[in-house]
Image (cartoon, rainbow, N blue to C red):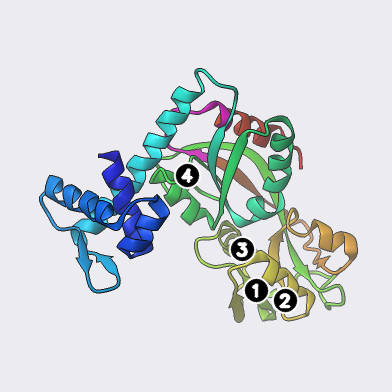
Amino acid sequence: MDQQLRVFVSVVENKNFSKAAKDLHMTQPAVSQYVKNLEQTLGTRLLERDNRTVSLNRAGDIVYHHAKELLNLYTKMNDLIDELTNNTSGKIKIGASYTYGEYVLPQVLARIHQRYPLISPNVKIGNSTEIGDLVYSHQLDVGIIEGDPPLKELSVMNFTEDEMVVVASPDHTLVNNNHIGLTDETWIVRETGSGTREATENMWQELSVTPKKTMEFGSTQLIKESVEAGIGISFLSKWAIRKELKLGTLAVIDLPEFVYKRTFSIVMRSPFQTKALEIFLRHVKEHQI
């Protein structure tokens, strides 16, 4: 059954039998037969076919998403068994929110690579909601997110804090001034679902700020460069702006008596951990920012 599911998933993701056959190093008739056998086993048609592509029907959509979960669990099971007789090695599917994933995680992975070169990380960067969903569906082994976990079914372990500050270009009139006028500024924010966006909205509420104009960008790097260019101001992690503060291309707007810190959490679903995952988690907790 697992081979049928692997073939089916490949056909779906390639949207084509011949491309799936090439990826799987199989003949196209063999791929077609695997899919046909799966449909017969389940007693329903899963794919809609035309001359060039295939697409999922409703039953196929259900099978595809569950097949992804099952195949990931099968891989994890093999990794756990393999570690009983081998040195620490194997793949880890890691998810991280943009702030941690882009500005902290590379340092953690570098240290792991030096000591455990046989561990092979596969990293997905996304907003906290997206990462939580992928961990829940077993498409990721572990996620690192900020803010509240999107799903109660996940196990959550808080492991560090991050301070956030309002930033502007160095020549902005509010730099080294008070927060009067924040409402009138153009705020550049992350998309809904991002932990940084959640923190920004919390900060607005605490300071009674109702922005008159906002711009929504899906990248912290794009936000930083836009702030540097003087387009507006933003609320960002100190982790994300370390280089810019050192170079003097961004400046912090001083908000008297206001400090905002958020918690970063490790989220998982499976109760089992491979040795490689245990090592990753240990390095994440030990890494000092």
Q: Is the N terminus in the top left, top right, bottom left or bottom right quadrant? A: top left
Q: Is residue 30 magenta?
A: no
Q: Residues within 10 Å of mark 1 (few under 14, many from 20)?
A: many
Q: With respect to residue 110, does 185 lie above or below?
A: below
Of the two numbered discs 3 and 2 in the rendering, the one whose residue sits closer to the viewer: 2
Numbered disc in front, either 2 or 4: 4
Picture quadrant of residue 47: bottom left
* Cα distance in 3D space between marks 4 and 1: 30 Å
Structural distance between the alpha carbons of marks 3 and 2: 17 Å
Q: Are marks 3 and 2 in contact (CB under 8 Å)?
A: no
* Residue 200 numbered tag: 3
Q: Earlier in the sequence, mark 2 or mark 4?
A: 4
The residue that disc 1 covers is 188
SS class of the residue under badge 4? loop
| Dots 2, 4 in contact, CB < 8 A | no
In the image, is 279 to the left or to the right of 111? left
| Dominant SS type (magenta) | loop
Location of residue 238 by image quarter? bottom right
Q: In front: mark 3 or mark 1?
A: 1
Per the image, the residue denoted by label 2 is 226
In the rendered image, the vertical position of residue 188 relative to residue 267, given as above or below = below
Q: Is residue 272 magenta?
A: yes
**What kind of element bears circle 3?**
helix
Q: Nearer the viewer, mark 4 or mark 1?
A: 4
Of residues 207 and 227, the one nearer the viewer is 227
Is the Cβ of the residue at disc 2 closer than 8 Å to that at disc 1?
yes
Q: Magenta segment, which residues? A: 267-276
Q: Which mark lies nearer to you, 3 or 4?
A: 4
Q: How many neighbours does mark 2 have within 10 angstroms: few (below 14), some (14-19), or many (20 or more)? A: some
Q: Secondary structure at mark 1?
A: strand
Give the class, few, some or many, for how many residues have Cα within 10 Å of label 3's Cα (few <14, many ≥20). Answer: many
Pick whichever of labels 4 and 1 is earlier in the sequence. 4
